[in-house]
Amino acid sequence: MDFRLTDEQEALRESVRDFARDVVAPVIAEHYERHTFPYEVIRQMGKMGLFGLPFPEEHGGMGGDYFALCLALEELARVDSSVAITLEAAVSLGAMPIFRFGTDEQKRRWLPKLLSGEALAGFGLTEPGFGSDAGGTQTRAVLDESTDEWVINGSKAFITNSGTDITALVTVTAVTGTRPDGAKELSTIIVPSGTPGFTVAPGYSKVGWNASDTHELTFDDCRVPAENLLGARGRGFAQFLRILDEGRIAIAALAVGLAQGCVDESVKYAKERHAFGQPIGNYQAIQFKIADMEMKAHTARLAYYDAAARMLAGEPFKRHAAIAKLHASTVAVDNAREATQIHGGYGFMNEYPVARFWRDSKILEIGEGTSEVQRMIIARDLGM
């Protein structure tokens, strides 16, 4: 098995790396401190085609694959995770459900804007009080046959890209009935931004990802046409499981980027910072810390490369995606902690990227499936 990148993949990685260094790095600290969304950066990412990377050209995409998206996410996250998660959520949670399960008309209506970066979409799954228990969904959608509309009532929490000026829609999971076995019938429904009864709460005050967009959403007799049903009625649970399995590979790539960024910054600082008459990088204690950080980032990268390769080959990949996400998120937290320690007091100052990395790392062990959920998935796939 050869994990070396092709010339085309290497060119993509280098172009995104240059973009992250030259465009994102100079402005992101101010956005992070002010909790503002970097629209100018997102526009340039759209012009580069990053939002369309894993989609066919016929829908306005770049004709690449999911691994190309992961490479871009890793390079962005080496500099900043807010920008990286905006891309990850826009593609794997926003546009991908419509591409995977949408009708031809839904694809024609929404995908060109989403794949160009002109518009963003959110994925409304998590609810207050029902984080990891997605089956506990309380949001309900009733089909009003007199008007041929879905009437949605409920709320969603922690939804990325749901309240920007360019957010076009949120795909919402809702209970639409009862299955023959008595379980909830879950379906997914497209709710365009601005629909009456659809309210976006003010943005959260977050520990990290402060330049990304995250909101709680409420639906109060929110009406959308019946044709806004995404995929088959009652298939919502299976749909979001597929989307989350894929998304975990992308989150793993993002986590690897953060972990590698910690290495980059630590190597740079260790060469510049002097103590007791010489660079601190000359001391074995610092060398060993950085060596361990590089080892962890490297093995986490191999894990997501492997999961992505299995997915693209059409092989079962659920367990491998969970392994990649679990390992990479753990490594990101570990490396962020060690990078902060290497920087000493400066690591606690927001002017240094590692302070941002430290604050951004923890959510990677929570979002798109907690570490505990990943262990459940792995154990179940092993037959336990």
Image (spheres, grey):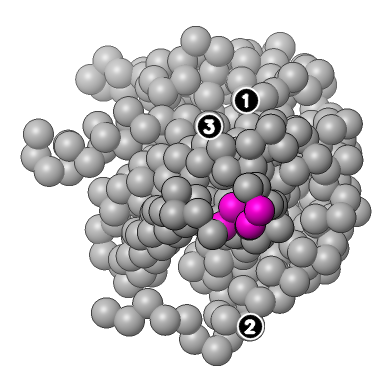
> What kind of residue is marked 1?
Phe
Marks 2/3 in contact by CB < 8 Å: the verdict is: no
Query: Measured along the vertical axis of the image, is residue 265 above or below residue 38?
Result: below
Q: Earlier in the sequence, mark 1 or mark 3?
A: 1
Mark 1, secondary structure of its residue? strand
Using a 10 Å C-alpha cutoff, classify the residue at mark 3 as few (fewer than 14 neighbours), some (14 to 19) or many (20 or more): some
Tell me the tag on residue 321.
none
> What kind of residue is marked 3?
Lys
**Which quadrant does the C terminus fall into?**
top left
In the image shown, does 238 or 18 lie closer to the viewer? 18
Q: In the visual, does 336 lie left or right of 30?
A: left
Q: Earlier in the sequence, mark 2 or mark 3?
A: 2
Locate residue 44, reporting x and y percent: 85, 63
Locate residue 345, reporting x and y percent: 69, 32
Q: Which residue is mark 1?
A: 158
Q: Earlier in the sequence, mark 1 or mark 2?
A: 2
Locate residue 341, reporting x and y percent: 56, 37
Q: Which residue is mark 3?
A: 362
Marks 1/3 in contact by CB < 8 Å: the verdict is: no
Residue range in magenta is 277-281
Tell me the tag on residue 11.
2
Query: Measured along the vertical axis of the image, is residue 163 above or below residue 219?
Result: below
Query: Measured along the vertical axis of the image, is residue 25 above or below residue 33?
Result: below
**In front of the other: label 2 or label 3?**
3
Locate residue 194, reporting x and y percent: 84, 30
